[in-house]
Amino acid sequence: MLAGADIFAQALGGLFLYGLSSIKGHIHGWRIAMLIAGGISICIGLAFAYLIPANMNGAWFLTAEEKQIAHDRVAREHASAHERHFQWDQFWETVKDPKFYLVFSWAFLLCACTVLNFGTLILNGLGYTSFITTVLQLPACAMQATCLILATLSCKRFPDHRGYIQAICAVVPLVGSILLQVLPYENKWPLAGSLWLTTCNYHILSVNLSIISSNIKGHTRKTLFSTVYYLGYATGCIVGPQLFRDEQAPLYKTAMRAISSMYGVYIVFMLLFMVLCKMENSRRDRLAAEGNEEAVPRPAADYDNKTDKQDLSFRYVL
């Protein structure tokens, strides 16, 4: 829902800002837009903090029986118990895990590949007016929303193939970035369409987070994975814009070549993550077949703070 709201904001935000920019007065239109958007955000944030519970025990809209059902359902999925103390054993286990660095790489590569901030510059460079440039971002938002819906439905239809779905999802912006390199400048509509394809990576980020939440156990360990993911995200947001050189406007060929390469590397890293998980699942299946009761896959009885490496009954979601 958050990713969908972000896409919706892109679609309406551009038109909203364009309309307010025409206001003439003591306060500039963009400042009015920030005041309105900021005020609404503060109100929604306060309402969210008040209405949304931190856990199922605080869910005021559930009965006692429904809270217990929710608790048991999450526990059966090998969810980690909340732990206030930092577990150093989980820290050392995590920093030795190659999946930890693959997760950082996912976020870095995807955010370094984002072209949303330069979409208007590319469209302006193709000769479109400011208003037409704003309107031409609407199809990009529609394509992003379509990809997000398709990715979500695919994960629901094929729950054990999320990594492969991710790799396929990355092909969409990869194709767009390649087309921006090879199409001639005169083909402006195909270039605009290629840009729309290149912006489609929100669905990849969304499924990324679901893979982390489903495959990582242990409160400290999961916190570290989430933290390194957002560190990669932030680092990619810093590095990505440096790829766009002023002298290469409007198509920024060097940036597009780098983006194509990074999507290719991302696909390889995603498949590598899946291979590591599959190998570990196979090892645990062999242990279970040899009579190791701890390795027999089964739903958890309750919350615990074992890591996914320590809990041999846990199976990674591929």
Image: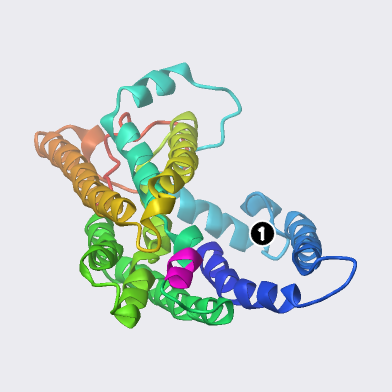
Q: Position of residue 102 (x, y in %)?
A: 30, 38
Q: Position of residue 149 (x, y in %)?
A: 40, 74
Relative vertical location of residue 89 with respect to residue 105 in this rendering, above or below: above
Q: Main secondary structure of the magenta part?
A: helix
Secondary structure, mark 1, is: helix
Q: 10 Å neighbourhood of mark 1: few (<14), some, or many (≥20)?
A: few
> Residue extending furthest front?
247
Can you tell which quarter of the image residue 195 is in?
Answer: bottom left
Relative vertical location of residue 113 with respect to residue 104 in this rendering, above or below: below
Relative vertical location of residue 290 with respect to residue 209 in this rendering, above or below: above
Name the amino acid type tagged 1: Ala
Can residue 77 be seen here? no
Can residue 155 be seen here? yes
Question: Closer to the camera, 318 or 2?
Answer: 2
Q: Indicate whether residue 178 is drawn in magenta.
A: no
Residue denoted by label 1 = 64
Query: Magenta region: which residues?
Result: 120-125
Q: Position of residue 101 (x, y in %)?
A: 32, 33
Q: Position of residue 208 (x, y in %)?
A: 38, 52
Question: Closer to the camera, 211 or 241?
Answer: 241
- Please state if 198 lies on the left or on the right of 160 as rendered: right
Kindly identify the residue that appears in the image at 41 percent across and 73 percent down: 126
Question: Closer to the camera, 134 or 162?
Answer: 134
Number of numbered discs: 1
Kindly identify the residue that appears in the image at 48 percent across and 64 percent down: 121
Question: Closer to the camera, 140 or 202?
Answer: 140
Picture colour scheme: rainbow
Kindly identify the residue that appears in the image at 43 percent across and 39 percent down: 232
